[in-house]
Image (cartoon, rainbow, N blue to C red):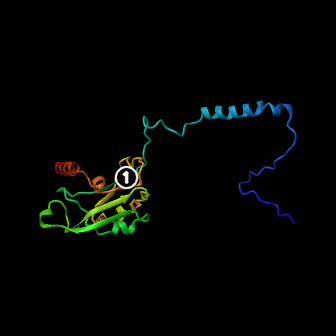
Amino acid sequence: MAVEQISLSGRKKVVSNKEMTFIEKIYLLTILKGLWITLKHLFRRKVTIKYPEEIREMSPVYRGQHMLMRDDEGRERCTACGLCALSCPAEAITMKAEERKPEEKHLYREEKYASIYEINMLRCIFCGLCEEACPKEAIFLTKSKKIANADYSREDFIFGKDKLVMPLEMAINNTKSNTAN
Ligand code: SF4
Ligand code: SF4
């Protein structure tokens, strides 16, 4: 016994092989129907924007490019504890820890620092869990609209400290404005 197939979408149509009428054969009605649909869309609110001339307003909870923070004295905050990497659901973070040398006290805040810190931007889903997990307030997802520029090679999407560490001038400016307030 043949089992009747149920249409999951509810839009199943039975195809008919009946002979087309003259009107159907010249497709005039079908073309007019198509044009009517196009015309209706002309007066609807546009869902697209003219990027890059227009830039869409971001959500207040938007999370953009990561930044490895510096303290008030410009020293890197990260101690390479690895908690951010452990909490990352996409396993996008890798790092290598090193002992700070006495002459490097002005560069790194703690006795241990990340000599290599990398985030694979092709894996990252910008969930912000690395920021939540960090006990040193060393990593933040910024409000910057930048995520990762389009590129041709996968290696270019692995962002190292050169792209992630807060620029020194920014740390100095932050300290200045904090002192002024
Ligand atoms: S934002 Fe989420 S996915 Fe991206 S590196 Fe941080 S924890 Fe991993
Ligand atoms: S960014 Fe924070 S959580 Fe990640 S290794 Fe550095 S100190 Fe630890």
Q: Quadrant of the N terminus?
A: bottom right
Residue lying at 47% horizontally and 35% vertically, measured from the top left: 50
Residue tagged 1: 156
Q: Nearer the viewer, residue 178 or 13?
A: 13
Residue lying at 42% horizontally and 34% vertically, measured from the top left: 53
Crowding near pointer 1: few (<14 within 10 Å), some, many (20+)?
Answer: some
Residue lying at 55% horizontally and 37% vertically, measured from the top left: 46
Q: Nearer the viewer, residue 31 or 10?
A: 31
Residue 134 appears in the figure: no
Identify residue type, mark 1. Answer: Asp
Question: Where is 135 relative to 44, above or below?
Answer: below
**Is 89 on the left-hand or right-hand side of 68?**
right
Residue 91 percent across, percent down from the top left: 41, 65
Residue lying at 22% horizontally and 60% vertically, measured from the top left: 76
Secondary structure found at label 1: helix
Residue 167 appears in the figure: yes
**Picture quadrant where residue 22 is located:** top right
